[in-house]
Image: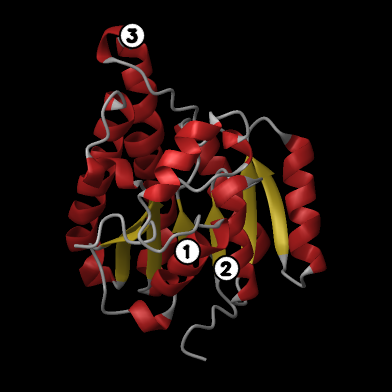
Amino acid sequence: MTFSLSQKVALVTGSSRGLGFGVAKSLGNAGAKVVINYLNDRESAEKALDSLKRDGTHAMLVRADVSDPEQVASLVEAVEEKFGSLDILVPNATPDQPQKPIEEYDADFYRQMYDFFVMSPFHLTRAVLPGMKKRGRGRIINITSEVFHCSVPEFSAYVAAKGGQIGWSRSMANELAPHGITVNTVAPGWIPTERHENDPQDAKDEYLKTIPLGRWGKPEDVGNAVSYFASDAASFITGQTLCVNGGRTPW
């Protein structure tokens, strides 16, 4: 029962497919009520919702732009009205992340990365804190990336924003610990999902060679790590980053 999330409510942003859906599925399998969030792809979101319900998960679907503070406030209000609480927050939503030299980026793109990976968790956390503080318990688990730890080149906007997200999470861990709220991060490696369908096969082959465990990660690998941080088993762990990448960052 240590890993049970029964009676807990989890919001996973950007969870209509890919890693986000893998996280939502794992939380649901652990017994949590799950909120699927999406912005543009309603068809995928409805399929995700149906899949969770077929598995016996109590779930709901909410459309919201999680980079917009007003929509974030409405999203959290809708969840709390439906389920009565919001116990687990997983900021996962992400825009496209093109890999290119710094000369080809512009300031607006850098700001977009910052909006998604620093400002969105900020808005979401501000919205869920009143309820979490009142209950004296909460779990915030940011989905970051190995790109920060591996210093991936020609990815400067994404790497910088993910570094900011990790730093912000560590600061929040110390600030919110007295309220019984833990803040941790899960840093996946390259895990092929729908967004990677058109990526060059030679790039995939070369990356696979660098994974010590010798296989590709799966969305549920990330989801299981999130479920651990969300559980009572991790109640004395905060401010930490767990790399889920088959051993590419072993420290």
Q: Are marks 1 and 2 in contact (CB under 8 Å)?
A: yes
Image color mode: secondary structure
Residue in view at x 34 percent, y 78 percent: 234
Three-letter residue code for mark 1: Ile
What's the residue at 55%, 56% (across, down)? 219
* Figure quadrant of residue 42: top right
Q: CA distance from mark 3 to mark 1?
A: 38 Å
Residue type highlighted by circle 2: Leu
Is 149 drawn above or below residue 6 in the view shown? above
Q: Which residue is mark 1?
A: 88
Label 2 sits on a secondary structure element that is helix
Label 3 vs 1, first from the N-terminus: 1
Amino acid type, callout 3:
Glu
In the foreground, 22 or 71: 22
Secondary structure state at the residue bearing disc 1 = strand
User: What residue appears at the point 63 percent right and 34 percent down from the top-left corner?
Assistant: 197
Q: Quadrant of residue 34?
A: bottom right
The spot of residue 166 in percent (x, y) is 25, 48
Q: Secondary structure at mark 3?
A: helix
- Between disc 3 and disc 2, the foreground one is 3
Q: Earlier in the sequence, mark 3 or mark 2?
A: 2
Asked if residue 186 lies left or right of residue 92, the reply is left
Mark 3 or 1, which is nearer the eye?
A: 3
Q: Which residue is mark 3?
A: 104
- The residue sitting at the bottom extreme is 1
Question: Would you name the residue on which mark 2 appears?
Answer: 27
